[in-house]
Image: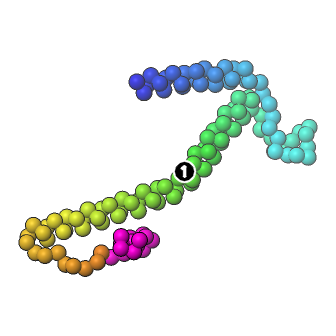
Amino acid sequence: MIAFLKGLVLLPVAIVLILLAIANRHAVTMSLDPFSSGVPELGVTQPLFVFLFAALLLGVLLGGTGSWIAGAKHRRARRYSHREVNRLKAEADRLRATVSAGRPVADRPLPVRAGLPVPRSSASI
């Protein structure tokens, strides 16, 4: 089903790109010299579709990089949560082993982790 949907979207995109390349195959000169319009020192002559595809590729790369950078805080939160879950699982396993061995669990408060809110007791409300 996913392959069908990919084909349903990508086939028209490919057809449009091929038609764009065929319609814009005339040579154009891209000049990087703003002062000389006749014979530019820094100029590249290519078909127009090469410049269009290069601009499209550059836009996709910049957009992907921006999205990846924007997702950094979510990846960091996921890593922190994963470590916290592993720590809590290990503590639960340790407590189960202690209880099943018949030893009393130490009556000490749990350590407060840096950056986590301290839970309020219901008596203070």
Q: Give the image location of residue 109, x and y in percent.
A: 29, 78
Is residue 113 at all visible to an observer of this figure? no
The residue at 51%/58% (across/down) is 73
Q: Give the range drawn in magenta.
A: 111-125
Asked if the magenta segment contains residue 122, the reply would be yes
Instruction: Please indicate whether residue 25 sits to the left or right of residue 60 in the image.
Output: right
Asked if the magenta segment contains residue 25, the reply would be no
Magenta span: helix, strand or loop, mainly?
A: loop
- 35 and 103: which one is in front? 103
Question: Label 1 sits on what residue type?
Answer: Trp
The residue at 46%/60% (across/down) is 76
Report the colour scheme. Answer: rainbow
Is residue 25 at all visible to an observer of this figure? yes
**Height in image: 91 above or below 5?**
below
Q: Quadrant of the C terminus?
A: bottom left
Q: Give the image location of residue 78, x and y in percent.
A: 42, 57
Q: Mark 1 points at which residue?
A: 68
Q: Give the image location of residue 38, x and y in percent.
A: 92, 37
Instruction: Please indicate whether residue 47 sits to the left or right of residue 35 in the image.
Output: left
The residue at 58%/21% (across/down) is 12
- 53 and 26: which one is in front? 53
Crowding around mark 1 (Cα neighbors within 10 Å: few <14, some 14 to 19, many 20+) is few
Q: Give the image location of residue 53, x and y in percent.
A: 67, 33
Instruction: Please indicate whether residue 96 sits to the left or right of residue 15 in the image.
Output: left
Instruction: Please indicate whether residue 69 sits to the left or right of residue 43 in the image.
Output: left
Residue positioned most to the left: 102
- 111 and 36: which one is in front? 111
The residue at 53%/53% (across/down) is 71
Q: What element carries label 1?
A: helix
- 46 and 112: which one is in front? 112
